[in-house]
């Protein structure tokens, strides 16, 4: 039995209702057989308890963060969640500080993670088209990838000692959506990286 913790990092507001992010969370939950996976979830629109959230991270074998990309970064509500939950978890539950001590300040920064052996996956919804990434001729991202853009978020989980599964992305969801194909790709991503690992 594997434990999966799904964080829905979308907070609904007038401009963006969160239907795609909610649909992807439900799709993931429905794809995980009950006899092999136990699932816990947290959504940003609901109240949460910091200690319970830390316990969910400790419990999980895999954490999936499903969220929209807001202004080239995480949603504000998920950033608030990180600032509270992850900061309080630095007491040894998520990491033992930054890994260094006053007695050995030369030890490498970021090596204090206590969630080693666990994995995480980012699943992102973008207004940006796929062609905007990984192409130096594109003006805005200058050849950088989605994972380059989300390097700080990856570092958050690396700080806990966790390993990344490949990131899933739904591109161009406002101006040129292809939701049915996004669902097909997402189902395959789940099979390749969650069910078959």
Image (tube, rainbow, N blue to C red):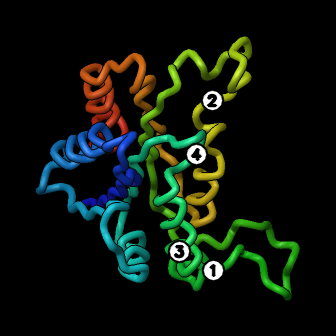
> Which of the two discs, 2 and 4, labels the residue nearer the N terminus?
4
Q: Which residue is mark 4?
A: 73
Q: Which residue is mark 3?
A: 84
Q: Is the residue under label 4 in contact with that under label 2 (CB below 8 Å)?
A: no
Left or right of residue 91, residue 175 in this image? left
Task: Give the image location of residue 26, x and y in percent.
Answer: 21, 46
Tag in front: 2 or 4: 4
- How crowded pointer 3 is (Cα within 10 Å; few <14, some 14-19, many 20+) is rated as few
SS category of the residue bearing label 2: loop
Give how far apart the Cα atoms at labels 2 and 1 are. Answer: 31 Å
SS category of the residue bearing label 3: helix
Q: Which residue is mark 2?
A: 145
Tag in front: 3 or 1: 3
Give how far apart the Cα atoms at labels 3 and 1 are. Answer: 16 Å
* 154 or 23: nearer the viewer: 23
Q: Which residue is mark 1?
A: 96
Task: Give the image location of residue 59, x and y in percent.
Answer: 35, 72
SS category of the residue bearing label 4: loop
Left or right of residue 113, residue 139 in this image? right
SS category of the residue bearing label 1: loop
> Which of the two discs, 2 and 1, labels the residue nearer the N terminus?
1
> Which of the two discs, 2 and 3, labels the residue nearer the N terminus?
3
């Amino acid at each position: 039995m594997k434990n999966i913790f799904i964080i829905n990092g979308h907070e609904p507001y007038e401009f963006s209702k969160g239907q795609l992010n909610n649909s992807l969370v439900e799709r993931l939950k429905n794809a995980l057989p009950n006899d092999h996976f136990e699932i816990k979830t947290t959504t940003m629109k609901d109240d949460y308890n910091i200690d319970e959230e830390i316990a969910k991270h400790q419990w999980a074998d895999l954490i999936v963060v499903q969220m929209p990309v807001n202004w080239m970064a995480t949603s504000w509500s998920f950033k608030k969640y990180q600032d509270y939950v992850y900061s309080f978890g630095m007491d040894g539950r998520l990491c033992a500080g930054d890994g260094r001590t006053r007695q050995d300040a030369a030890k490498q920064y970021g090596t204090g993670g206590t969630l080693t052996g666990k994995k995480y996956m980012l699943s992102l919804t973008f207004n940006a088209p796929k062609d905007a990434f990984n192409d130096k001729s594109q003006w805005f991202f200058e050849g950088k990838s989605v994972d380059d853009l989300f390097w700080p978020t990856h570092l958050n989980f690396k700080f806990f000692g966790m390993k990344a599964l490949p990131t899933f992305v739904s591109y161009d969801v406002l101006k040129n959506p292809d939701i049915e194909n996004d669902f097909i790709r997402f189902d395959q991503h789940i099979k390749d990286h969650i069910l078959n690992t």
